[in-house]
Image (tube, rainbow, N blue to C red):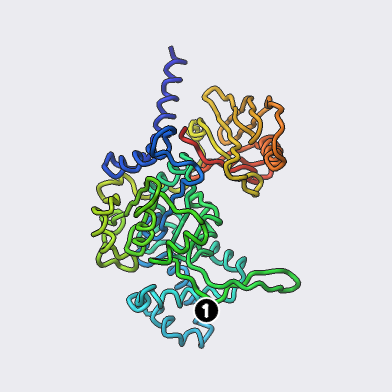
Amino acid sequence: MLRYLVCCLVCWNVAKATEPLPSWNDSASKRAIIDFVQKVTSEGSSNFVPVPERIAVFDNDGTLWPENPVPFQLAYALDVIKQRSAVDSKLAAEPMVQAAKKGDFAKLLEGPHHDGLLRIMALTHAGMTTEEFKSSVEAWLKTAKHPRLERGYDQLTYQPMQEVLAYFRANSFKTFIVSGGGADFMRVWSERVYGIPPEQVIGSTARTRYETRNGLPVLVKTLEQLFVDDKEGKPVGIHQFIGRRPIACFGNSDGDKAMLEYTTINNSRPCFGLIVHHTDSEREYAYDKAPQSSGKLIDALADAPSRGWVVVDMKKDWKDIWTPTPKEPSASSEINLIGKWVAEDIYGGGVIDNALSTLEISLDGSVSGSTAVNRYAGKAKIDGQKIVIGPLAVTRRAGPPALMEQESKFTSAIGKVVSFRIEVSGLLYLSDASGNDVLRFAKLSK
């Protein structure tokens, strides 16, 4: 009887852990998201959308994390500009630098694309190599904190939207960030914070120049040929970098209106648009017509009813807002492992699209899945955050050389695994004895 009760408790915990969107109240918004995903993933249905066409695009500032009192990239740039202008008189004389130091954000946000803000971004980003810029952003994220919310900026993501990202990926969607923010800035942390790899981040860019420095090849950021990935620029960026029309779009402002239109108007596939409306002044901020910084929402909100776009009332629809801060591993991590996972990366080299290498872990510790060509089965020994998989029994079919190569890498990586972690993004990382991540998986709902 005791063993039966324990089994029931574990099964209940598994069901609870896999419930879609647990940080959402039972609202029309939550039901609309789930209904759309179920509709387009039901094989045999007239609404079924093949996996390669399941593209979902997400604005970043104000949609996945806050944008007040200023966008986080501007917060980074302001800290940098203060340091540099203190020792560079020419930089200090720049009108937009002076406005930034005075806190005149209205001046910085003037113009169709927040021209002053973009000038500050260019002044603080150009001339650095891409690696220098990455190191600068990483160092800033380790110490900088939001002035009101008093948490690190990369710990201020919206938990309900993290769950949407995980839910869509579990249903074989590719998730992209399409943001007016700088692409290089977001690519530093997007995979760690959202589970979105750098190649799936579309943002504002300027020309990057190739050079050799001290005999080594480097890429240098410049001020030239600026492309602003905002408003009408977002559909252009989607076309240039994705090459497929999305079927789901998530935004929060008029800057996302063109992207919502491109996704949902005259789309040959079933489509979905959602606007995050900031209505919670206590837990976050409340604004639409008069935001503190960016994120004005007037026209898109007015168009939402006629376009069929879902409008999320942050105060009413979200039980929780913030992603929990990292905690020590617990026994519940083992429960979260249960289910079917699909590999997104092997040894840092990615995977072949639609050539699935999978891992399914059952309650009794048995494992099975596909290597890309063959099927395998065996056992996993799990103890806390430690996991050892194998030995495995594998079928012996031959396949195309590229798939056989992926299979070889997959089975090699599986054999080296000694530990695991599940990030807030919902992604599973399997690591070797040296602490290197050798496999990254996304959870499948089916």
Q: Nearer the viewer, residue 40 or 330?
A: 40
Q: Say which element carries label 1.
A: helix
The residue at the point 67 percent across, 38 percent down is 410
Question: Residue 213, image x and y in percent?
Answer: 71, 74
The residue at the point 38 percent across, 64 percent down is 147
What amino acid is at disc 1?
Answer: Arg
Question: Residue 327, image x and y in percent?
Answer: 48, 44
Q: Residue furthest right?
A: 215
Question: Residue 309, image x and y in percent?
Answer: 30, 51
Quadrant occupied by the N terminus: top left
| Vertical position of residue 102 compared to residue 291: above or below | below
Asked if residue 331 can be seen in this view, the reply is: yes
In-image side of 439 versus 261 (left or right): right
In terms of image quadrants, where is residue 303?
A: bottom left
**How many residues crowd around disc 1 within 10 Å: few (fewer than 14), some, or many (20 or more)?**
some
Question: Residue 130, image x and y in percent?
Answer: 60, 67
Q: Which residue is mark 1?
A: 84
Q: Nearer the viewer, residue 302 or 289?
A: 302
